Each structure stands twice: as C-alpha cells, then as structure tokens.
Image: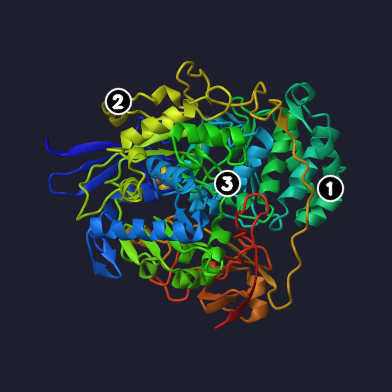
Amino acid sequence: MTDNDKTTRTTCPYCGVGCGVLATRREDGTVTVAGDPHHPANFGRLCSKGSALGETLSLDDRLLYPEIAGKRSDWDTALDLVAGKFTEAIRDHGPDSVAFYVSGQILTEDYYVANKLMKGFIGSANIDTNSRLCMASSVAGHRRAFGTDTVPGTYEDLELADLVVLVGSNLAWCHPVLFQRLEAAKASNPALRVVVIDPRRTATCAIADLHLALKPDTDVALFNGLLSFLAESNALNKIYINRFTEGFHKSLEIAGPCEIGAIAEATGLERRDIALFYKMVARTEKTVTVYSQGVNQSVAGTDKVNAIINTHLATGRIGKPGMGPFSVTGQPNAMGGREVGGLANMLAGHMELENAHHRRVVKDFWQSPVIADKPGLKAVDLFKAVGAGRIKALWIMATSPVDSLPDADSVAEALRVCPFVVVSEVTRTADTVPFADVLLPAAAWGEKDGTVTNSERRISRQRPFLELPGEARPDWWQMNEAARKMGFGEAFSYGNAAGIFREHAALSDYRNGGSRDFDIGAYKDVSDTHYDSLPPFQWPQAAESPPADTRFFSNGGFFTEGRKGRFVPVAFQAPRRRERAYPFILNTGRVRDQWHTMTRTAKTARLMSHIAEPFAEIHPDDAARLGIAAAELVEVKSPHGSVIVRALLTPRVRKGEVYVPMHWTDQFASRARIDAVVAPETDPHSGQPGSKFTPVAVSRV
Ligand code: SF4
C-alpha cells in the first residue's frame, strides 16, 4: 500500500449473498479486492469469483460510445431516436406495444427509474426482468402465504439452527460464502445437521448428514408427506396454527395421510431415508429450510415453495432465531428489483398492481399521468409477443436473453423481427448486441453508484472507484434522459443515485407505512453525504419506529387481509411422462467459478481453469448403454435445439438424467448454449420457466 492507494467499500456484483468488498485502486492503476471484515453478509470472506474481481476490470471489448445501426453516434442523437421510436409505437399501437427487459444485475436505483417510466408514465406493465428466471416462484409463494414478498429470516439463522435443510440448492457453488458460514457453524456446533435434497450429488453434499437424491420435480410429494408426518407424530405447534394462521386443515387434507411407501414411489427415495428426514425435522425445533433454483425453476415452483412454507407454519418455526423457510436468490439484486416492482406483476414498494388502492397510492406519489392497471408480460411470454410482432419497441438492459431464456433460438428470432431494439450493455461481446438498432454503453461494476439488496433483505451500497470510460453512463441516467425526451421531464430530473434512493425510500413510507412489509422510510431524507457512507442495513427501517429485530412472523403479523399466515393446499402432480424420443431429463445450473454468460468471469485465467469447457454429466450406466466413453463429445437434444458438449461420466447424476451448465455461449464454445435446448414451459403462478426439467435425447456425436 502507498499513500496514494485508495480503498472503496462496495459490494460484490455476483450472487445473492451480497458480500461486502474492499476494492483498492493502486497507484499503478491496478485494483485489488478483499472481503470487507465489517460487512454482515460475509465478515471478510470472499469466494473464488469475488476474490478475482480485480482481474475482470479491463476495458477489452467495452462499449464506449452510443451506436446506431452499428455506427458510432452520440447520446443526444441516440436517445432522440430511442424516445422517438418508443413515442411513435405508443401513439400508433398503444402503451402495451413497448417493453423493457431488465436484469437482477442492475442497481435498485436503475430498477426504480425503469419501473416508474414504464408503469407510471408510459402506462404499461411490460417490464420484466431476468430475475423472473431466478426467484419469481419464491415471490409468488411468499405472497400466497404471507400476503407480501417477505423473506422472514436472516443468514444468522443458518448458524443458529440445529438442522439446515437445503432444497434444490448447491450452496457450495452458487452461494459459496453462505456455505462457508454454514460449514463453520457445523464445525463449531456438533448438534447441527445438514440435509441436502437435490437430484444431483453436488459439492454441497460434502457437509450433508443426509442426501436425498429425489426424482426431479417431486418436492411437493416429499414436503406434503412431511406435513402429514408432523401432524401424525404430534409435532405441530397448535397454538401458533390457531392464533396466527388459516387454512391448515385443508392443506393437511390435500397432503393426505403420510404413506411413506407412496412417497418413496413418487420421489424415488428409500423409505428409511424419508423416515429419517421426517424424524429429524419433527424432533428439531431450530430448523431452517433453505431453497433455491431447484425449487423455483420448475413448472411447480410456487407449489414447492408453499409446500415448504406450510411445514414451517405448522410448527411455528418461522421468524425466530435459527428457524424459518429461507429463499436464497441467485442474482446480486433480484431482491432490490422486487422492492421497486421489477416484475411485470408488481408495483414499487411491494405494492400490488392488481390492487386499486395501491395503484392510486403510487400514481399519486409519482404525480403520474397514468398507471398500469393490469400485469404486463412475463419474460417468456414477453419474448413470444416480440416474436409475434406485438412489441414494436424493446429496451434490453444488462442481460442476454438470447442465451439465458428457454428456447433461446426463438428469442433470437424474435429479436430479429422486432422493429426496434435498444440494448444497454457493458460489453460488445454480449450475444444480444448484434440485434441492437441502438446500442448504449452502460456503466460497469466499479463505476456504478447505487444500492443492492441481498437474500436476507440487507441493502448495501455499490460504490464507484473507477471513472466512467469513454461515454459510458449508468442505466438510470439513460432512462432518465430518454424519459425527458419523451416529455416526462418534471418527474425525471434525477441528478444522482442518492436522489432516486430518497424517492424510493419516501414512496415506501407514503400512505403505506405500517400496513405493508417493505418500509425504508427512515432514509427518505438521507443526504448525499450520508448516502455515500450508508452502512449495510436490513429492512424494514420505518421512519418512526426502526425495529429491534428484522425477522418476521414469529408472532403472526402477516400482511394478508386478516393478518394471518396462509397455509396453501398444494396437490402433488407427478411430472409429465417422457416421450420415447427424449428419454432423459435435462437439468441445468451453475458451476463454481463462472457467472451467467461469462462476459466477466471468462476474463480471468484462474476462474477459467476451474472448469475449462462445457460438459454433460451422464450416469456411467446410461453412458455404457449408449456406448458413450468418458470425455467423448455428445449431443443433447430437445425439440427446441441441441448442444454438443463433452461427456462427464459420473454417478453424481441419477440414471436417466443429464446435467449441463448454463454459462457457455457460442463465444466460448461452439454449440454449447444450453438454453437453446430448454423447453419454454412455465409455472402457472409465477411465470418462472422450468429450466431443470426438459426431456432430451443424448447421443454420441
Ligand atoms: Fe460474491 Fe457471492 Fe462469492 Fe460473496 S459468495 S463473493 S457475493 S459471488
């Protein structure tokens, strides 16, 4: 360190753990990073991705100037065109003819401006986000059970628990620092047991006392059976059920009697393992059930979430130290987006689009000419509408749907036929860039200024420590300027991120405080200086009465009409039968050292060296039957598309199933975009795609 080195306290841009990072800019221009010892998410820890952040900051392939039709332009001309085309489409075809598709990578302030512009000034709710692919089922499940999208617990609960059940979560690779915390807690507390429920034997199983490798999409059968078992073994908290909840008996009736044999048949699990799991839960008061994409990314995702929550309501194990259902989000700011209405079916401040009173509150606060009065198109349907010609102007920010949405080739085709596509991006290598009529250079991590919210509702600052290169600008600024050019100037006169945050905090408090969960009114008058130094905090933080404990629901107080937690009856539906031509079930997911479509993580050799190329995990017995040798190239094919990847023969996957990582795009390996293979089927409640269950064929190339 020299006197001229400067350290900035900021937040990691990758996963939903939301670790605090100390970024030090050295005199020679290099940047080194370390974990922030004072950040309550990580207390100084970082994972491999976070600790390599300093190696990802080069300007190679950066977009530095606005472009129109592939030629360099300037902001004024580019935004004139954007504003003109959106205005024209709205005039000629109505507000629902335009759309924004944003991202859990953008900051809360960016999200706020995007939602305000689309829902309050354009008058459509056609703004959805790649967070739809991440946690929409948790949002829907929370709202059904709690009345709002509220995560009841905190990270600390994993350390205080005596039993942590991880469902559809490879915590070791997808939320590594949270896994490190759990690992440390297990080392210091011999009573702590870990159960992993996942069709694959993932790295997380290294600390599992029990691994339940259930058949894909059979979680509802397992958790309905648990609810019945709890009832039959006298493990219910009847006082909690009677005082604070409703609908228990109906849910129990739908769950049916606890027939371990039938549950074993449905889930493919051993009877003794099911019985052992049920007994562990029944006997352990301090139980946390952590769930992630294996639960959410399913056509039954919302039902799975509610089946899990039902067991916590039945035992009253919610909102108390070491107890509760806990959704961990994939992205760095999926939660922040939820808070400002980032989904097509939500309004800002956790208010609801379907609720006339909430619409009036938001419209009044914004003093907006209109307010969207019906939910917009959710991600998969949005791009179907683009392909069908119903969307005339589309603005995509910080995400590459041609790689990450299911049936990705159809998404590319939809962009090809869309009359006007705006892409705000950091890198020229993003696969959505070639489809842009207008390309806008966005600020990247290290340059951005704003806030993110992690999985435990903790709002942290992302602070800039690098100058904006070329003419790159923050996403909020781009929308602010476009809105002004569309004639909405008065409402879009933000000078900095702090001003947007103040308005966001004030809306959370406006005629709303006390009646709903999301309230950060304490920050509505935060000064620019205070915002700059804002320490991480958990919501709620109401203006008048900051809470002593930010856990929710230990003593009821749900946000439903009657203030009672709702049991949601969920019937198990066996996953659909496989067609003979597609006998395998494809599961997709992350690897430890890559992030999304690798535009940042592929810049560092040490992250690339973890797993150098895409692969398909295949059970050795299946491989032998198909004549596939280890490391041979195989084709994984569905009716939607195919990839060619290397066979990795391993009993980690169940027979009849195949696992392919989601990260590789055509830039990094030819024909490896696995989302081109994934079926565009969605959960009926959440609209989240079932990215972990696509019938496929596997063959030697
Ligand atoms: Fe970043 Fe997540 Fe790793 Fe923390 S655990 S350093 S937030 S990627």
Question: Does residue 684 appear in this view?
Answer: yes
Amino acid type of the residue tagged 1 in the rendering: Ile
Amino acid type of the residue tagged 3 in the rendering: Asn
Question: Does residue 187 appear in this view?
Answer: no
On the picture, is 335 further left or further right than 140? left
Q: Of discs 1 and 2, which sits in the foreground? A: 2
Callout 2: few (<14), some (14-19), or many (20+) C-alpha neighbours within 10 Å? some
x and y percent of residue 355 in the render?
A: 62, 37
Name the residue at 76% across, 40% down. Answer: 278
x and y percent of residue 647 in the render?
A: 54, 73
Q: Does 503 appear above or below 694? A: above
Viewer-nearest residue: 610 or 29: 29
Indicate the quadrant containing the N terminus: top left, top right, bottom left or bottom right: top left
Viewer-nearest residue: 541 or 74: 74
Q: Does 614 appear above or below 295? A: below
Say whether disc 1 or disc 2 marks the residue closer to the N-terminus.
1
Q: Does 683 appear above or below 656? A: above
| Label 3 element class | loop
Alpha carbon separation for disc pair 1 and 2: 59 Å
**Which residue is outermost to the bottom?**
701
The chosen color scheme is rainbow
Residue with the mark numbered 3: 345
Alpha carbon separation for disc pair 1 and 3: 39 Å
Q: Does 554 appear above or below 44? A: above
Alpha carbon separation for disc pair 3 and 2: 32 Å
Residue with the mark numbered 2: 527
| Label 1 element class | helix
Callout 1: few (<14), some (14-19), or many (20+) C-alpha neighbours within 10 Å? many
> Image quadrant of ligand 1?
top left
Badges 1 and 3: C-beta atoms under 8 Å apart?
no
Residue with the mark numbered 1: 260
